[in-house]
Amino acid sequence: MTPRPSQHGAAAGTPAPPSPLAGGRDGALRLAAGGGRSAAGVWRKAAGRPGMWRAGMAAGEGLGPALRAVTERVQQAAARRPQGLPDVQPRLVAVSKTKPAEMVMDAYSHGQRSFGENYVQELLEKASDSRILSSCPEIKWHFIGHLQKNNVNKLIAVPNLFMLETVDSVKLADRVNSSWQKKGSPQRLKVMVQVNTSGEDSKHGLPPRDTAAAVEHVINKCPSLEFVGLMTIGSVGHDLSKGPNPDFQVLLSLRQEVCEKLNLPIEKVELSMGMSTDFQHAIEVGSTNVRIGSTIFGERDYSNKADGSKAPGETKGKTEASAAQGR
């Protein structure tokens, strides 16, 4: 896989009409029901290939076959986008949670550069592993899990931290901004604002109505942070025969609102949406950042993951959402 350039400006997507936003998720559902085929691309389910990584391991090729297969499907989905969308290769974030450092290094050796983790302590330990530090100099770590304020300093200490995708309050943004500023990095930390597009209690994120205000706060009040996009977790198991995923449609509409209110170019606001079960559909409707785990690394085994591997405060909370954050 050819690594995607590190700049965040390679976003893509067609701005959805702003009117459905007033109705929130229901408004997006009405938009989808109205036959907006061009916005949805080709509605189809993304058939998973869970056995691909096993075949690669058995053949002694490591994660190469699985990565190649996923990369091909990402490229195919991007090619199916409606005419008029920017010709941009979406970023593939390989979610390596619960997986050993050896698998990260294996994926890196096959060209993968962007990796995602859900738990601060696991990310810190993995990113600080001397083997990864020496053999993966261009690695880019994305934090995609729920971040509690008492774990911010620990996250900021992560080597090669590239992006925080889950800013879900202005208070968290302020805490991250202060901590990154104290670190003295010459680069601003890239952040996304997470939105709870479905309104489910099991998921983290801002209510859609608060999104524009949060983005404005990050841009105007957090000089050490660089706002790069919006992130959501789509409804798991959505039946695409009934239309596009409404959560994705909400995020598209929110981007339109944010760009209009804050005078931001659409191409400068990324959309992080899509995981192993729905990343092709997400790309077809405009995602620029997909978080894929089990399709690359195989199913996760949490049985040996002791609570001690998580930072304080990470052992409780919305476990369902944490598990789904990067399937």
Image (cartoon, rainbow, N blue to C red):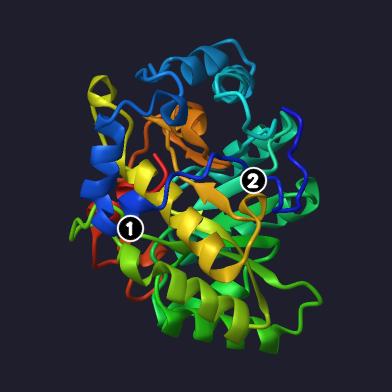
Marks 2,1: beta carbons within 8 A: no
For residue 69, which quarter of the picture?
A: top right
- Check the picture and name the quadrant holding the N terminus: top right
- On the rendered structure, is 11 left or right of 125? right
Residue 267 pos. (x, y %): 66, 49
Residue 163 pos. (x, y %): 61, 61
Q: Which residue type carries mark 2?
A: Ala
- On the rendered structure, is 40 left or right of 191? left
Q: Residue at x 24, y 66 (%)?
A: 317
Q: How far apart are marks 2 and 1 (CA)?
A: 38 Å
- Disc 1 is placed on an element classified as loop
- On the rendered structure, is 165 left or right of 147? right
Position of 119 relative to 187 (above/below): above
Q: Residues within 10 Å of mark 2 (few under 14, many from 20)?
A: many
Instruction: In the rendered structure, find residue 306 and report the number of the disc placed on it.
Output: 1
Q: Which residue type carries mark 1?
A: Ala
- Disc 2 is placed on an element classified as loop
Q: Residue at x 55, y 25 (%)?
A: 81
Q: Residue at x 68, y 86 (%)?
A: 181
Residue 27 pos. (x, y %): 25, 48
Residue at the disc numbered 2 = 11
